[in-house]
Image (spheres, helix red, strand yellow):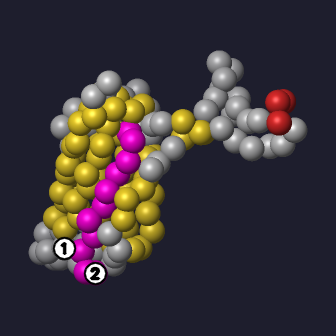
Amino acid sequence: MSIRTYRATAIIAAGETTATAYTSNIKGKILKIGINYPANTCTVDVDSQDEAHSQKILDLAADNTDKTVYPRVALHDYTGTAIDLSDTEGGDTAMYGYFVVNGRLKLSLASGTAADSVTIQVDVEE
């Protein structure tokens, strides 16, 4: 097991309110994502790219506070049914695992201010 860090920075151009940037190719489990926000508020999305179906990994509404998040995805069985602990623990508690990515990540900014930038730092177990 090795852990590698990937980065992407999106900068909003003059006269615009949106921006997009991509990481290099990633193959592994996403452990955490650090987000470095500008002083102004903007919306940040992170999605996988280059896969059969993109995965929504982060969807952060208007914010301007730097943070680190540990995104997880609900697990499914071979039929596509969500797995929960109801059979073994007597409740309806969903089970979660790491996002597994084989491709780039797309960083999208919306509702931002010109010249603002957001950087993500993604730690991946390869």
Q: Which residues are magenta?
A: 30-40
- The residue type indicated by label 1 comes to Asp
Magenta region includes residue 117: no
Q: Nearer the viewer, residue 55 or 98?
A: 98
Magenta region includes residue 33: yes
Residue 31, quarter of picture: top left
Q: Position of residue 21 (x, y in %)?
A: 20, 52
> Which residue lies most toward the bottom here?
40
Q: Nearer the viewer, residue 116 or 14?
A: 116
Q: Earlier in the sequence, mark 1 or mark 2?
A: 2
Does 38 sit left or right of 49 as displayed? left
The quarter of the picture where the C terminus appears is: top left
Q: Position of residue 30 (x, y in %)?
A: 38, 39
Mark 1 vs 2: CB contact within 8 A:
yes
Q: Position of residue 5 (x, y in %)?
A: 23, 42
Residue ID for mark 2: 40
Residue ID for mark 1: 116
